[in-house]
Amino acid sequence: MSDLVVENLSLSFGGVMAIKDVSFSVEPGEIYAIIGPNGAGKSTIFNAISRIYRPDAGSISFRGQPLLERKANQIVDLGIARTFQNIELFENATVLDNLLVGRSSKVRTGWVSEWFFTRRVRAEEHAHRRKIEEILDLLDMQHYRYEKVADLAYGARKNVELARALCAEPQLLLLDEPASGLNPEETTDMSFWLKDIKEELGVTVVMVEHDMNLVGRIADRCMALANGQVLAVGSVADVQGDAHVQAAYLGG
Ligand code: ADP
Ligand code: MG
């Protein structure tokens, strides 16, 4: 069974069709890239999956579960986490505190149990800490764990966002332009981390990305969009070589 199945999705803002009849599916464990010019509808697809926008037509399912019947806050419980095109973090909190917030969907004990079942809470806290340490190690973030997010360089802030999404222990990770604004060295690091996330954590990744070098290095498959419609799906090389895709990029 595919992890994510999007069928005939359409969504308009006022009279403007942002996406038209978009269908695609993502297989378990793959890194799937969505490419396309600005305004193509890439972020809109993510916003429809994460239930921020309601599509006009179509369906979305994750591991056989229909998503459009769920509320945005139920999506994370199904195992889907995302990052945003513009970083959204608690700026005045430390890196560690931001990750603890990312963990909140996993907190099972409420104040009542905290009062009565202290041992269980301790065990749970320990599990949270262990998970956070694992993510800090994976993304090489230990040296700035106590720094305030507002004081970090841009590349580090992007990592915090990625780490926070991983704290929810997703099975599907949606990344909106993970390498935008990164320098070449940071982009290379990002490519290794995304491979680790796929290979070591077994997470399925869907990423919107402009950097075709990065896409070529790590994506298993890729879908090109323009004007809200799918132009081509396939291996990165096939999609880059597609005549419709080339015309869209050249403005033809
Ligand atoms: P991309 O991420 O590919 O650059 P978007 O999905 O952000 O593109 O946008 C697709 C189209 O939908 C664009 O024409 C954009 O202006 C429009 N759009 C996106 N979000 C909104 C919104 N909240 N209100 C009105 N129009 C929007
Ligand atoms: Mg976008």
Image (cartoon, rainbow, N blue to C red):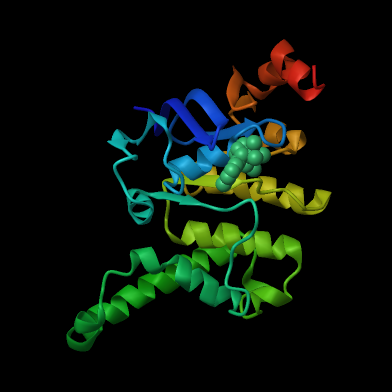
Q: Position of residue 243 (x, y in %)?
A: 73, 11
Q: Is residue 234 visible?
A: no
In the image, 235 versus 231, the foreground residue is 231
Give the farthest residue toward the top.
Answer: 243
Q: In this rendering, is residue 5 above or below 190?
A: above
Location of residue 224 with respect to 141 vertically, above or below: above
Give the vertical position of 115 relative to 185 (above or below): below
Q: Quadrant of residue 49?
A: top left
Q: How many marks?
A: 0
Where does residue 149 sit, x and y in percent of width and height? 65, 74
Q: Quadrant of residue 116?
A: bottom left
Residue that protrudes farthest toward the left in the picture: 116
Percent position (x, y) of residue 99?
Answer: 51, 69
Where is residue 44? Give x, y as percent. Answer: 55, 40
Quadrant for ligand 1 reads top right
Frontmost residue, 202 versus 109: 109
Q: Residue furthest front?
A: 15
Residue 23 placement, left or right of 233: left
For residue 246, above or below residue 15: above
Q: Can residue 38 be spotted in the picture?
A: yes
Left or right side of 25 for 224: right
Instruction: In this rendered view, identify the residue nearer to me: 28 or 200.
Output: 28
Q: Quadrant of the N terminus?
A: top left
Query: Which residue is nearer to you in this view: 73 or 172?
Result: 73
Residue at x 62% of width, y 21% of height:
235
The C terminus, quarter of image: top right
Residue at the image position 46 percent from the left and 71 percent from the top? 101
Name, please, the residue furthest toward the bottom. 115
Q: Which residue lies at the image location 71% right of the left edge and 18% below the top edge?
A: 245
